[in-house]
Amino acid sequence: MVTLEDLSDIRDRVQHELASHKHRIHVCVAAGCIASGSKDVLQAFRNEILSRQLTDKCIVKGVGCMGPCAGSPVIAIEPDGVMYCNVTVDDVPEIMNSLGKQPVARLQMNTDQPFFTRQKKIVLENSGKIDPDEIDDYIAAKGYHSLYKVLSSMSPVEVIAEVIKSGLRGRGGGGYPTGLKWTTVAKTGAQEKYIVCNADEGDPGAFMDRSVLESDPHRVLEGMAIAAYAVGADHGYIYIRAEYPLAYERLRKAIQQAEETTFLGRRIMGTTFNFHIELRLGAGAYVCGEETALIASIEGGRGTPQTTSSLPSRTRLVWENQLSLTTSRPLPTFPQFYATAGIGLRLSVPREAKAQRSSHLQATSRTSD
Amino acid sequence: MYQKSKFPEPPTDDKRWHSVQVVMRKHGRSPHALIESLHAVQDAFGYLDRDALTYVARSLDVPLSKAYGVATFYQYFTLKPPGQHKCVVCTGTACYIKGMTELLDALKEKYGVNVEQTTEDGTLTLQSACCIGTCGLAPIATVDGEDLGKVSKEELLAKLEEVLHGHS
């Protein structure tokens, strides 16, 4: 049985470890920065710290996307809040020399520009701050606390009521109310229900899903687990496109870690709730982002869209001769997962930030009032 | 009477079939594992030939026509053996604006290959990608999995020379 104390212990341990280092160097290891050679930069920092014998003062971490991908590779020095862009391996000694002193002006990025100052990260709040390969980092950022709260103190009906109250809507364009979709699925008496997460992001130039999958994969898993608890599903699929090998690999690792710590799999956190997540890799078909095509592809067929007479959440599929109910894209894009994962716990957004957000996000934040 | 053996034997003794068998077993040889299994074959061999398709189809108990249908539907799968080295040029919107056509023209001029073609000596395959997701680095090409962001045609050709002939 996992208790809140266990989660707090992990949080305290990670935070203590971080606080014990005077300088924390965050090197972005998301797709854009890796393509520009950030892995070499990361290794160069590690070598430099070892050779200067600064291991007790400096710590270097690979983190997720920080946002300004055109300036990749991007690194950040915490807790000073200094960001550098276009860093090469040759710049590493100079940056190491500047720690605790004046930053290297030639590489420094202006963080006082609207891109940073007018942006309030909600879904991507951990992105660029935690190591996506470490479940402990996510727990330290209050991860899996919402799942614990939901499983330990809320009934599925209460979870859905909270989502309805939040006014959360789909982000795929249709804006279908998530609460309504969940209610529909929860009320259906099908024996088997599935949560399908659509990570087949194909729109040119749009990488919001990838940012999250690569930078904070556990958040997606936690959101799916909460959705599954709410609607009574015990199996989930993440359909991810083959063009995102890094995201696939990080999700695979995240699922493994979550299963080892009983946050996924059988008897989650010692309760009677079971939820398994399987990854399905796409194979380069844009159309598979469409829900009926996506389901066909998960079933191992050609991704041919079909006409449906009703909502996708009522689409009935013959799966191994059993009539089962598929919740396709219960949460058309990931932001919903987070808002959901944040029920009562995560959405404590400062008041001034609320005013800046769009109307339906404001509706979401009502849960914290 | 024709009887289907329970677990068909791989077409050859090649050890790489082992990884394919592992994937199929992991999914309980369910017909739903067709795409995953084809991924495994392509990861191991680089392409899907008729023997491989037949083997996977029989193992998963799906008609060969379905396996062929799936293999031809998805852009990721290829039925022809690839060249020794692979160059992928992104042809997405951002890369188009930043001049990816110049890259393709330069490759055609130097190596005589169009998109989805392999050079006659079988050393280089040219492919296009709809978007590899790093528009901040447009135009981008990858050579054997290594990304070359904001690449000029001279840089790309130099990199290919290095890969193909071992010098720059």
Image (tube, coloured by chain):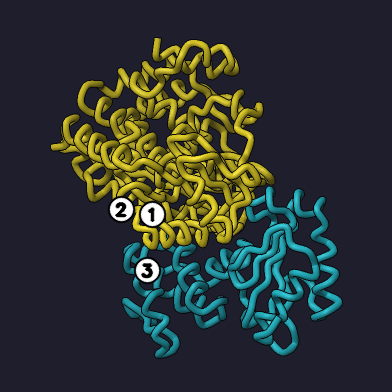
Residue at the disc numbered 1: A252
> Residue B27: which quarter of the image?
bottom left
Asked if marks 3 and 1 touch (Cβ < 8 Å), the reply is no
Residue A244 at least partly seen: no
- Distance from Cα at disc 1 to Cα at disc 2: 6 Å
Q: Residue furthest left?
A: A1
A56 and A224: which one is in front?
Answer: A56
Residue found 72% across the figure and 81% down from its top: B161
Q: Name the chain letter of the residue that bears numbered label 3.
A: B
Label 3, secondary structure: give it: helix
Please give the residue where the numbered disc 2 appears in the rendered image. Answer: A256
The chain that hosts pointer 2 is A
**Chain A on-screen colour:** yellow
Q: Using the image, determine if residue A116 lies above or below residue A65.
A: above
x then y, percent, for residue B80: 64, 79
Q: In which quarter of the image is the N terminus of chain A?
A: top left
Residue A175 visible from this viewpoint:
yes
Sort mark 1 into few (<14), some (14-19) or many (20+) by Cα contacts within 10 Å.
some
Instruction: Find numbered disc 2 in the image and state the secondary structure of the residue it sits on.
Output: helix
| Residue kind at label 1, given as amino acid type | Arg
| Residue beneath disc 3 | B24
> Mark 1, chain letter?
A
Mark 1–mark 2 contact, CB under 8 Å?
yes
What amino acid is at disc 3?
Met
Where residue B128 appears, x then y in whole percent? 71, 64
Residue depicted at 23% across the width and 39% down the height: A13
Chain B palette colour: cyan
